[in-house]
Amino acid sequence: MTNAIEFVGDVSVFSLRAIADLFRPPFEAEQFWIQLAEIGSRSVPLIVASGFALGAVMTLHTRSTLVTFGATAEIPTVQSLGFFIEIGPLVAGLLMAGRVGSGIGAVLANLRVTEQIDAIESLSIDSFKFLVVPRVLACVIALPLLTLIMDFSGLVAGFVAEYAASGISWHLYIERAFASLDWANFVPPTLKTAVFGFIIGAVSSYFGYTTSEGAQGVGKAATNSVVLCSLLIIVSDVVLVQCIAVAFPRTAL
Amino acid sequence: MNPDDSTAVFFQSVSKSFGAKEVLHEVSFNVAAGEALCILGRSGTGKSVTLKLIIALLRPDAGKIWIEQDEITTLKTEELSRVRRKIGFLFQDAALFDSFTLYENLSLPLARLTSKSQEEIDSMVVKVLREVGLAADKKTMPSQLSGGMRKRAGLARALVLEPKILLADEPVSGLDRITASEIDELLLQQKTERQTTLIMVTHDVHGARRVGDRFVVFDHGHLVAYGTAAEVESSDNETARQLISLSS
């Protein structure tokens, strides 16, 4: 129990330090752009493919149910609401916890065990600001953008699946998809992924940066990053959905 | 007691433990500016920890450490950064940044810590790489370098800011005798031509006796011998005598 409390305290202090150091010069702009490219652009193929597959599957399942009630016209609405409010943000968060969380954990742990972090410090460079802060910030910025990409990939795949089944036009599909979609359904759920991004960046950096177990520590840091990031994303999603529902009652469909 | 002006590094009753294991117990020694000190000892006796304490990568549990006139155990991060700029560190496995080319490894500290122009940085990097015999490899990634080349590249990075104090953690471990001799020669060159203070952890007695002016010997966290090679040879501690012996 004491260890668990100590661990939560350590992760919290580490995360707060990342926030505080974000506003303290020198600003690591170059490292931030490198990380944004690594975390953001290189995740696009995975996000698009996953969004497309999920979108098609969701339409196929929804159609078989809605046909029973003669409500197939609602398929685009269900698709857009489902993706923009919950599926897009949550799945993008979990996918990034796997791809980016494990990557950050393993890379930082490797830098630690090969004394590269010590080498950075020995050169009078603040290794925390140089390595951790740009990664956390890149995750916070990249997650909402990747979520948007996932949302639209799902929508396009939904159209393709529905077009194959009913021959619906793109114009009509989009009109129906956005007819019931309000900004409050779209903006807060997308922005909540910035919190997921912070969790991924801070937690995986914590495991990597503080590892002390040699080569075995690299594997542990990667695994622990994915497990804890995924768990915290799901738990925080429950809290954030409640907060959004209170702040924006129209999202609580 | 404060160190005098000729002191580069001064340890005063320094102790350091990791959990229940005490790695250093009330260790005191002095290194004069321009002097070469070799730290000898069996594995796990606190030699590398001593180097990390000097550059404040670790903090002592007790005792004081001076770098020239700065007592570093109480310094804040910004002040520590100023002191660290006087020190170059050659890590045991070189610790080159593996996602950077050799050029980038050397230019990073120059770009970050000096106000030199890009042309000045270029010429400085090329000059240091030429000194260690790696001028042709500036675009090479660390993973493509041999063990000896990595050590030389690590040495180049440690020297690029022209430090007054150079720390070397087992600079010749895992190298053949010829390459080890080349590294020793580079270290000796730094000491004689630039009057760099050198503190070296090594298991290579031949190299140590060639480079070192004085020696400290650690055994189970205690400093058991301290002085010139002749003084350590005549020490009443058997471990010290064995470690300094050329036949070991």
Image (spheres, rainbow, N blue to C red):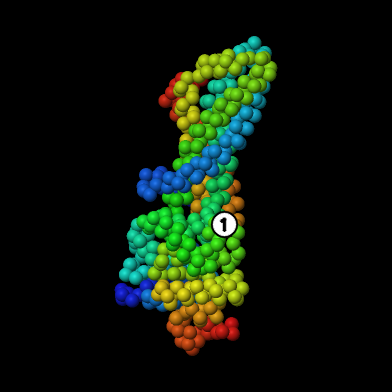
| Residue nearest the viewer, comparing B39 with A237 | B39
Residue behind mark 1: B141
Q: Residue at x 49, y 78 (%)?
A: B211
Question: Where is residue B74, by image quadrant?
Answer: bottom left
Q: Residue at x 49, y 68 (%)?
A: B131
Quarter of the image for the C terminus of chain B: give it: bottom right
| Residue nearest the viewer, comparing B168 with B223 | B168
Residue A252 in sight: yes
Residue B242 image point, x, y percent: 55, 83
| Element assignment for label 1 | loop
Q: Furthest-top residue in view?
A: A70
Q: Mark 1: few, some, or many residues within 10 Å (few <14, many ≥20)?
A: some
Q: Chain of mark 1?
A: B
Using the image, determine if residue A55 lies above or below residue B101.
above
| Residue nearest the viewer, comparing A231 with A4 | A231
Using the image, determine if residue A29 lies above or below residue B63.
above
Q: Looking at the picture, which amino acid does disc 1 mark?
A: Met
On the picture, is A77 further left or further right than B14? right
Residue A149 image point, x, y percent: 55, 30
Quarter of the image for the N terminus of chain B: give it: bottom left
Picture mark count: 1
Q: Residue at x 50, y 52 (%)?
A: A209
Residue B66 image point, x, y percent: 36, 70
